[in-house]
Amino acid sequence: MTDANLDLRETTAAAVAARIGAEPRSPRTTVIRPIEHAPLLDLRELWHYRELLFIFVWRDLKVRYKQTAVGVGWVLLQPLMTMLIFTFFLGRYAKAPTNGLPYPIFIMSGLLPMILFSSAVSQSSASIVSSSSLVTKVYFPRVLLPLAAAAVPLVDLMLSFSLLVGLMFYYSMFPSGALIALAPLFLILALVGALGIGLFLSALYVRYRDVPFAIPFFLQLLPWVSGVYLSLNKLPQHWQWIFALNPMSGVVMAWRWVMLGQTAPDLGKFALGCAVAVVLFVFGLVFFKRSEPRFADTI
Amino acid sequence: MAAIAITAEGLSKRYEIGQFRAAYGTLRDSLAHGAKRLLSREHEKHSRAEIWALKDVSFEVAEGEVLGFIGRNGAGKSTLLKILTRITTPTDGRAEIHGRVGSLLEVGTGFHPELTGRENIYLNGAILGMKRREIARKLPEIVEFSGVEAFIDTPVKRYSSGMYVRLAFAVAAHLEPEILLIDEVLSVGDAEFQRRCLGRMEDMSNSGRTVLFVSHNMPAVVQLCDRAILLEGGRNTHEGPSADIVAHYLQSTGGSASQRSWPELETAPGDDLVRLRGVRVVREDGSSSGAIDVRHAVGIEIAFSVLRAGEAVVPKIKVYDGQGNTAFNAMDTDNRWADPAPPGDYIATAWIPGNLLNEGLITVDVGLVTLVGPRPHHRAIERNAVSFHVHDPGEGDSARGSFAGQWKGVVRPLLDWTSQER
């Protein structure tokens, strides 16, 4: 036996000895049972793992723009380019209805919550499969992965919000007072809907690799039917009710209401959107929870 | 009586072959499959074979106990650990675990190549269940232990694989679980790393933690575990002191045993002069056993029948270690065999002294030879006649002292050392 090996053991032993008794031991009991007994949402456990949630968000933020030239500038570049192109084609050329707003600020105010929603959906959908090495090796509430993935775009939004602020100054259009306090609530509504879809798709993705093909297609169509590119106010009432099923149309309208002093969304239609978002969330969560025990076996 | 750390009752895990098949399918496959089933109306039991990876496994582990799990590949060892670490859920049964669980399955889990060493310590620590404050407090210690101080703010993708593993292990080693689960079969890394795992595990058990150890390394199981459970086909078939269970397992897989006998004279190994009748591995007290303490002598008891007078017959053994190396040959040089023995039944026992053989599986060829001049001539030979397992309880009075790691060599003599100060 060489000296190195003996040294190694000594260091290990010393390290352990130094720590024994340093930590108060909490007798924590874990019960392992078959699937049927798992609760839908174990809030106590989620609270226990809250730090891991933040660590996942931190990791995603930290890692994302490593080794990129433009770096965090991508967060601004995407909405900016979209705004320029759509302003040229839809605003100048096609004269799309904007409820009287200048087209750049009209599209930007809708684009920000829309990007939040789309990024949350696409990133949370991929979250389980892209962390397969974690899922097959260590236990933690799996729901943390889509949750963290959906929270990351929220940080992006804080940055890209500066674009909207810039446009507000340019057009001298400012939020009408205290109403702006409601803005975060609408973002949360967007996230609730996005999480519902994200939870469902992330669990589905574990079994079916079709998911990443379907998502971009769906997300490309969504801004059109959410009133991001052109106002839906001129549509006949029964059409408006159909579009109201999409929670994002309510979110976009409400966001323009609190940011740019547009007319408030119709309460009935908005409530319908909220209900759909909540239903999506509950459905997504149930589906996720029912698939969760099989993740490690099928991923 | 010590408190119970883990109770498992009837743990079972069923996999469906169909489930595996559909695992990587596409939606279209599933839809097509569903449609076909609907049309052909045989939706029940089409071709769903089931596998019970684990069936009705129950056990208890006392606090501070070190329990080993052995068995062939596919016997359910890894599935069991996956259930206990909650990576997968059991199909049936129930387990209760009292205390914080850590496992060395997780070494390096979640490391992100783009993050620096320091950042990965936080990330990995959190994934393994450490609190931020706890990690912050232990950070200097972890960094020092890992030996990569100079590169701690470099992305780990620039690390050598050795540095990577050292850092990962440093985090896992500071997890301080009350219950440690180790799957050596799954653990990656070089021999050095494996040795670290074993060393770490021994420290843990010495400090009174509960350890569950899954391994193919039989000497390690015997040495480190108080008790062992043998899993066969997903069931726990044998449970008891680790040396006995390991010996049983090795003998059941090796196809040989610690005792053999040939009741039929005609078919027994040998010829018209002499035939083997039985071979036993015996302890000093004469009891037969397949598990031998490294410090104690072990006897190879050879029973044979001399059928006719005329030639001098000498019993002989040839001893192999677990890797198939010949440890030594030995022949009974007692004068009583110098002259032809009269026909009859004889028993000769070869005593291998304690502190000679190394740990592991020992296999013995047994033979009866006649000496033609100086050359032995085999009259009866049985290859791999018996085998037994040598283990070291690690009480410090064997040749390895209190060292816990691998102690290589075919033999392991306890030498007389002289020393002086000069």
Image (cartoon, helix red, strand yellow):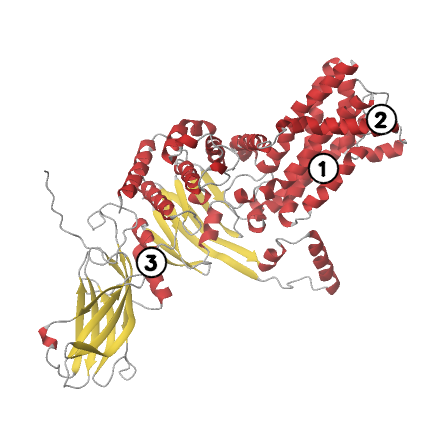
* Mark found first going from the N terminus, 2 or 1: 2
Using the image as rendered, state which of residue A293 and residue B157 is in the foreground.
B157
Whether marks 2 and 1 lie on the same chain: yes
Q: What's the chain of the residue with tag 1?
A: A
Using the image as rendered, state which of residue A277 and residue A122 is in the foreground.
A122
Identity of the residue furthest to the right in this view: A236
**Residue under label 3:** B246
Residue B13 position, x and y percent, is 52, 54
Whether residue B128 is visible = no
Camera-nearest label, 3 or 2: 2
**Residue under label 1:** A279
Whole-angstrom CA distance, mark 3 to mark 2, is: 79 Å
Residue B239 position, x and y percent, is 36, 56
Q: Residues within 10 Å of mark 1 (few under 14, many from 20)?
A: some
Report the amino acid beneath label 1. Val
Whole-angstrom CA distance, mark 2 to mark 1, is: 35 Å
Taking the spot 20% from the left edge, 80% from the top edge, the residue there is B305
Task: Say how many tags the image has.
Answer: 3
Q: What's the chain of the residue with tag 2?
A: A
Q: Is residue B353 left or right of residue B209?
A: left
**Residue under label 2:** A91
Q: Is residue A123 left or right of residue A79?
A: left
Using the image as rendered, state which of residue B339 and residue B287 is in the foreground.
B339
Residue B292 position, x and y percent, is 25, 59
